[in-house]
Image (tube, coloured by chain):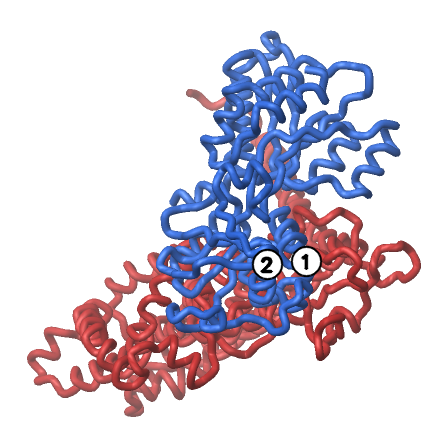
Chain colours: A red, B blue
């Protein structure tokens, strides 16, 4: 290869032209994405509008009352919320109540946050402040890779493996829940009492590894304790005990299962964002606090967490946004029962899952179709708001860090 | 794993149909066969299509199994000549077809199917009457029961102890519709019924839970579940055996149909004709049995052929 004898001027023109073309392409791409997002919103809105336009068609009409308030139906004693797209022939009025679906969506998101937030924030705080750098370099990318796990895979594992397992080992599940959190705290307490020589062999930065045998020990302890606990406390059968004493029926596809599965799915998102926020806190702050005699725990609670609070908040918000929009996990793991009960042992049905199940078979232009698109519009608005809020808060955090970094 | 594959059957079908139509290049092509309709019959249509493809290597076969509700619009619009359906056309669907074409669609029965009420294989439930399963599954109780049945004890069983956990299909499926019409006297389901996207998932959930009951297509039965015999109004007990299903003695039996757009006095194009001929042949009916449905008696086959002028 040899250089072509082009004049420097020509070459500069060429480079400028290329730059300009690239800029134009990037701008066009950006505008295109924004236009597409807005077009989705506009499309949904236009499709939903005829739903509230009375007299335009002969199809059963819905209004805000039938969508959100309990309705009375023949054969039932009191007004209820019902989502029943397939009506028996000769039945008056539609049964499209969005209330149980919205409730199910929020319930699923809430339980998944209950599972994900403590674990993800704990992991983020630990890996940002306490973990050894070598271990962190291995663990952080692994956790972030979990985010790439398709929802359908997690859903299948939850619906086909976790749900039947928990149903058969309800006692063990409860024992684990009661035993593991105090067990881990006990592990920490024991560690701080260890003689110094041994403690240096088990450094805090590597606790993620040496805690594994401890967890295994707790697991076998729980396994040994579970039948004993179930027999002594719950007359030998937790499921029957729940039904008799609390009036709660344990259904194998329930909100807890959904919460666990979806919590697993949103955990990496929350972890990654919270970890970035926590490790982004200027080191001068933490070092200053420790130089003044604060312990590591005090540094975390009083200095680092408040400084990173907006970032942690936006991490949780983005996690919530993902949980609300998640479809496959809820579809497979929840049982899709459009109920409005607060019991976490009952099933639920989410907006997204209803759309996925029913939209392909709803007649385009019909009431059912439009109500489903209304559900889609609600989801769209909700995730849009949550994500925008999270981004605004994050932007503010970034500015705050910059200010802190400037004035040491 | 099997359930996973089965649940994704429509997707598989698409893939398979695509793969296997692909190698046929345009110049060998002798015709195209399009069908749009029932997903209950997806496996059946696929196997028939495969066999037809073996016999006529140049034939392009496109099978779409979205659901029974998709067949009438496609037939009316003229997108397809064959519409497999697991339920009869409604009066509206039929009228729309007549309005467009000026003649009614021809209806042929190609196999028999039945819905079965399934319980866990350890469940000792001897039989159920229509009134009982209406009381279990519905909140409207149009079949005449005075109160709902929520626990196994109410059916006179000592075990299992506990609530009855209900499983069923999603509201847009034909199976859901048939069960509601025949089983619940056109009433409405309880909201507590777990809705699954496929019959295989229903059966799997019931197999996992001793307190569960569900309904599914006959061809989805597995060793983990037991089909409960049904009692008719006279108190006779019917098991879903091939004889009972064929003779219509079993209360939840149904016909699987193909609706054909064939103008009166004319004959079908070659591809459709060959397909239907295969369906009513000995090999075609053997496939029906192989997939867990019930084949038609010889007399019915002759009658169906006569309808189409085959």
Query: Which secondary structure lies at badge 2?
Result: helix
Residue A226 picture location, percent across and down? 25, 77
Q: Nearer the viewer, residue A15 or B178?
A: B178
Q: Nearer the viewer, residue A7 or A222?
A: A222
Q: Residue at x 50, y 15 (%)?
A: B54
> Which mark is on residue A243?
none
In the structure shown, which secondary structural element does the residue marked by tag 1 occupy?
loop
Q: Which residue is mark 1?
A: B185
Q: Position of residue A75 (x, y in %)?
A: 72, 71
Q: Chain of mark 2?
A: B
Measure the C-alpha gap from mark 1 to mark 2: 9 Å
Residue A332: image location, x then y, percent: 49, 56
Is the residue under label 2 in contact with that under label 1 (CB below 8 Å)? Answer: yes
Residue B137 sits in quarter: bottom right
Mark 2 = which residue?
A: B130
* Position of residue A234 measured from the top left corner of the image (x, y, whole percent): 32, 83
Mark 1 vs mark 2: tell me if same chain: yes
Q: Is residue A35 left or right of residue A284?
A: right
In the displayed structure, B9 sits above or below A206; it is above
């Amino acid at each position: 290869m040899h250089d072509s004898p082009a004049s420097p001027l020509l070459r500069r023109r060429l480079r400028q032209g290329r730059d300009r073309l690239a800029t134009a392409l990037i701008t066009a791409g950006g505008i295109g994405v924004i236009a597409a997002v807005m077009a989705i919103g506009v499309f949904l809105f236009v499709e939903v509008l005829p739903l509230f336009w009375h007299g335009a068609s002969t199809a059963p009409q819905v209004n805000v009352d039938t969508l959100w308030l309990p309705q009375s139906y023949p054969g039932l004693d009191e007004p209820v919320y019902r989502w029943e797209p397939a009506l028996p022939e000769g039945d008056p009025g539609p049964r499209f109540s969005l209330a149980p679906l919205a409730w199910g969506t929020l319930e699923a998101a809430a339980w998944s946050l209950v599972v994900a937030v403590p674990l993800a924030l704990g992991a983020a705080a630990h890996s940002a402040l306490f973990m050894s750098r070598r271990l962190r370099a291995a663990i952080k990318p692994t956790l972030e890779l979990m985010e790439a796990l398709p929802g359908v895979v997690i859903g299948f594992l939850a619906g086909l493996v976790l749900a039947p397992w928990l149903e058969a080992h309800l006692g063990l599940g409860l024992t684990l829940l009661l035993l593991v959190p105090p067990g881990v705290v006990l592990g920490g307490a024991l560690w701080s009492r260890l003689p110094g020589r041994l403690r240096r062999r088990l450094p805090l930065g590597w606790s993620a590894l040496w805690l594994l045998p401890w967890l295994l020990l707790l697991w076998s302890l729980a396994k040994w304790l579970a039948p004993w606990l179930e027999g002594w406390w719950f007359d030998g059968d937790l499921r029957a005990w729940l039904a008799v004493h609390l009036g709660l029926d344990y259904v194998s596809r329930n909100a807890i299962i959904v919460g666990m599965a979806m919590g697993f799915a949103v955990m990496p998102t929350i972890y990654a964002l919270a970890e970035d926020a926590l490790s982004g806190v200027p080191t001068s702050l933490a070092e200053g606090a420790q130089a003044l005699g604060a312990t590591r725990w005090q540094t975390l609670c009083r200095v680092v967490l408040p400084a990173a609070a907006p970032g942690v908040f936006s991490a949780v918000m983005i996690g919530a946004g993902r949980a609300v929009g998640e479809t496959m996990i809820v579809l497979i793991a929840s049982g899709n029962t459009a109920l409005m009960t607060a019991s976490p042992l009952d099933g639920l049905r989410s907006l997204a899952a209803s759309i996925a199940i029913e939209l392909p078979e709803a007649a385009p232009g019909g009431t059912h179709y439009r109500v489903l698109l209304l559900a889609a519009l609600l989801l769209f608005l909700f995730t849009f708001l949550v994500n925008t809020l999270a981004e605004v808060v994050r932007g503010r955090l970034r500015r705050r860090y910059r200010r802190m970094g400037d004035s040491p | 794993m099997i359930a996973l594959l089965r649940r994704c059957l429509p997707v598989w079908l698409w893939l398979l149909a695509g793969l296997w139509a692909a190698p046929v290049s345009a110049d060998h092509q002798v015709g195209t066969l399009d069908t749009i309709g029932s997903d209950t019959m997806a496996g059946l249509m696929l196997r028939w299509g495969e066999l037809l493809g073996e016999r006529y290597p140049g034939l392009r076969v496109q099978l779409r199994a979205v659901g029974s509700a998709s067949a009438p619009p496609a037939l009316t619009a003229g997108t397809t000549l064959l519409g497999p359906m697991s339920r009869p056309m409604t009066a509206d669907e039929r009228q729309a077809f007549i309005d467009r074409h000026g003649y009614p669609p021809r209806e042929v029965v190609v196999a028999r199917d039945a819905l079965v009420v399934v319980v866990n294989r350890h469940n000792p439930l001897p039989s159920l009457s229509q009134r009982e399963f209406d009381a279990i599954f519905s909140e409207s109780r149009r079949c005449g029961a005075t109160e709902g049945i929520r626990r196994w004890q109410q059916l006179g069983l000592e075990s299992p102890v506990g609530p009855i956990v209900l499983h069923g299909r999603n509201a847009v499926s034909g199976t859901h519709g048939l069960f509601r019409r025949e089983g619940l006297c056109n009433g409405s389901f309880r909201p507590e019924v777990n809705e699954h996207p496929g019959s295989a998932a229903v059966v799997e959930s019931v197999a996992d839970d001793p307190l569960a009951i569900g309904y599914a297509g006959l061809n989805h039965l597995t060793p983990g579940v037991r089909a409960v015999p049904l009692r008719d109004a006279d108190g006779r007990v019917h098991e879903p055996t091939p004889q009972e299903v064929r003779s219509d003695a079993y209360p939840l039996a149904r016909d699987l149909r193909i609706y054909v757009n064939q103008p009166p006095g004319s004959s079908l194009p070659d591809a459709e004709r060959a397909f239907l001929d295969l369906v009513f042949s000995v090999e075609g009916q053997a496939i029906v049995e192989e997939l867990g449905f019930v084949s038609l008696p010889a007399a019915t086959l002759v009658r169906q052929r006569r309808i189409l002028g085959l």
